[in-house]
Image (cartoon, rainbow, N blue to C red):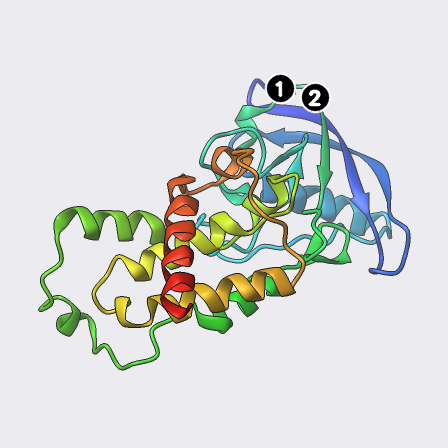
Amino acid sequence: MSASTINLTLKVWRQNRTDKKGRFETYPANNISTDMSFLEMLDVVNEELTQKNIEPIAFDHDCREGICGMCGAVVNGRPHGQEAETTLCQLHMRHFSDGDTIVIEPWRARAFKQVKDLVVDRSALDRIIQAGGYISVNAGGAPDANTTPIPKDAADAAFNAAACIGCGACVAACPNASAMLFIGAKVSHLALLPQGRPEAARRVRAMVRKMDELGFGNCSNETECEVECPKGISIREIARLNREFMKAELKSA
């Protein structure tokens, strides 16, 4: 083994279907380059499983550039692994040591239905967006938006909130499986911009109602969501969500 490769033991959650009982299975991952990403390491393991006529491990992935929010798994108890502000596809094997045992599990939340192995159905987040996480009027194209004066601090705050990729790590990290960091980011992103203000009250009430309907929990200030967010979304977005919700409720009373 060269200095740039490591041998690992993987304990991976395997589950064929939602209604089937899952279990951990152990696989070796040998001669893994430390330059590989975590998903590329799983690709190597799956290639070996396929050659042995063992069904490969199912896991979500898409862009593999840390911007689509598609990938995600709990690695050694932490969503997306131990590195701060890092998606699973951008987590590199150099952060692990030769001989390590890695435990890999799917997101676990009532609102995220198990599909197979490490794959869960996160469409509940999409349904929250469908409930109101958008601007319904024609706000024009990018040149039109740039003609609307926006204070620099508001533009920066909206941009920071818009960095949320909707991966669901905040839900997986929260002991209440709350989606309030996700909703807070989406509400803040739009409420901070003049194009989003006219529908702010309707939007926040609709999104919170949908969150409750889908079985997500409430925030109890555990702050794990902020710690595990791969895009560094602050829990200040939850505070802004609560303020927007209270204003909307008082306005409708």
Q: Is residue 164 visible?
A: no
Can you say which quadrant of the picture contains the C terminus?
Answer: bottom left
- Residue found at x 23% / y 61%: 193
Residue 144, horizontal then vertical, whole percent: 14, 74
Closer-to-camera residue (63/199): 199
Q: Residue at x 61, y 65 (%)?
A: 123
Q: Residue at x 56, y 33 (%)?
A: 222
From the viewer's perspective, is 69 left or right of 159? right
* Residue located 85% across and 57% down the image: 16
Residue 212 in the image: state x and y as whole percent.
61, 60
Residue furthest out toward the bottom: 138
* Displayed quadrant of residue 231: top left
Q: Position of residue 20 (x, y in %)?
A: 90, 57
Q: Residue 237 at x, y = what percent?
A: 39, 46
**Mark 2–mark 1 distance (CA, rounded to whole Å):** 6 Å
* Looking at the image, residue 59 lies above or below residue 201: above
Q: Is residue 234 left or right of residue 157?
A: right
Q: Residues within 10 Å of mark 2 (few under 14, many from 20)?
A: few
Q: Which mark is residue 97?
A: 1
* Quadrant (top left/top right/bottom left/bottom right) for the N terminus: top right
At mark 1, the secondary structure is loop
Work out whether 85 lies above or below 200. Answer: above
What numbered label is drawn on residue 33? none
Q: Which residue is mark 2?
A: 100
> Closest to the observer: 45 or 183?
183
